[in-house]
Image: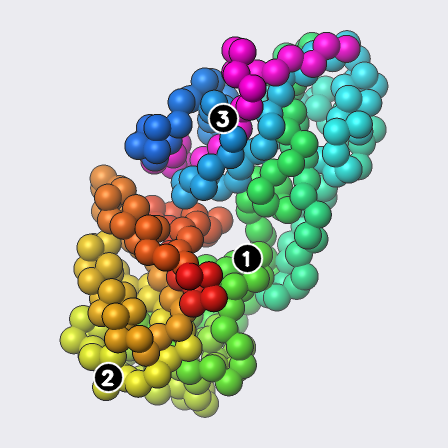
Amino acid sequence: MVSILTSMGQNKCTGYLAPLDFELDLKKELTLLGIAILETHGRLFLCEGEAQDVVFAQDTWHDVEKVEYSSISNAAEALRTRAGRWSHYSINNHRRAELVLDKIPSVKIKRYNFLDPIPQTSIGVFSLLSESQMLVSPKTNCPLPFGEIQFNEDKINPPSRAYLKLWELFTLYNIRPLAGQRVIDVGSCPGGWTWVLQTVGCHVVSVDKAPLDPKIAALPNIEFLKESAFGLRPQHIGKLDWFFSDIICYPDKLLELVTRFRDSGLVDNFACTIKFQAPTDFETMFKLKAIPGSRIVHLSCNKHEVTWINLKNNS
Ligand SMILES: C[S@@+](CC[C@H](N)C(=O)[O-])C[C@H]1O[C@@H](n2cnc3c(N)ncnc32)[C@H](O)[C@@H]1O
């Protein structure tokens, strides 16, 4: 078996997988970051060099190789020597790939409950390009296939599906407030995020111009302020462990708002949705990313929006 390094003579090749329908955003971000794209396969972009932190990559594949194989068993053997557990990204030769999967330890797609433990070991991914060649990465960023998590959803209690964004952040990324902490949720109506924060034991200051769903407003430990978030003064709100925002506004308005709260020194951590109009405001996204302690991710349930996280202990 011959193993060929990809990228036409380059030493390292990284795969960035775009979220469904966001291939153009990933392509633009890669270009802005100066990352050379070598090949694309569906929503997978194979790029030159070591893996970098790319927001519109739902998952990142490290050390991608093109590997020649001569049979199903031969492909399975090549994979087994490279990683312990595998997922398959389907481009071509689907039936053949299933036969390979039958011969290797594979990651089963399953539904998780909120705050279920997520396996911590990294997984490999392969993709058959033809009957004799496959793409192989022994290590991906996310321990779940394609950077996606599927939940057993709660169809009864939350008043909107926005709660899934916090479920994902808290469960898959393990980024969450502690019980007893004081948090603010701006742009909170009808109350999906406020509900999640309340269920994990936080004291929630919930702010929106529109009213909360009465079922949520009636829960304990929620103080609702019916006003514009942009008129809020941090000194009037007081000390906060977390600032959450899912507010609909232009990214530069969000940057202004979080800068005011950061500068006050009264907030420790932030988790905010950056919502884009078309076109995507990369300039403001990069400004938020550059704030010390920041990270931006595209959650599985983010559409044309991403999630900015700023943690005090990461600064
Ligand atoms: C996507 S919804 C939030 C959904 C919410 N996170 C949930 O889980 O149910 C965006 C919210 O931003 C609110 N909003 C827009 N402009 C606002 C402002 N200036 N101040 C406060 N809320 C605002 C809207 O009223 C709307 O309820």
Q: Earlier in the sequence, mark 3 or mark 2?
A: 3
**For residue 150, above or below residue 159:** above
Q: Residue furthest left?
A: 231
Q: Is residue 164 visible?
A: no
Kindly identify which residue carries mark 3: 49
In the rendered structure, the answer to whether residue 194 lies left or right of residue 250 reads right
Residue in view at x 35 percent, y 28 percent: 34
Residue type beneath disc 1: Tyr
Label ID, residue 229: none
Seen in the image, is 186 located left or right of residue 10? Answer: left
Mark 1: secondary structure? loop
Disc 2 target residue = 235
* Res 145 seen here: yes
* Marks 1/3: CA–CA distance: 25 Å
- In the image, which residues are magenta? 1-26
Where does residue 149 sit, x and y in percent of width and height? 57, 51
State whether residue 157 is above or below residue 296. Answer: below
Q: Position of residue 62 (x, y in %)?
A: 58, 32
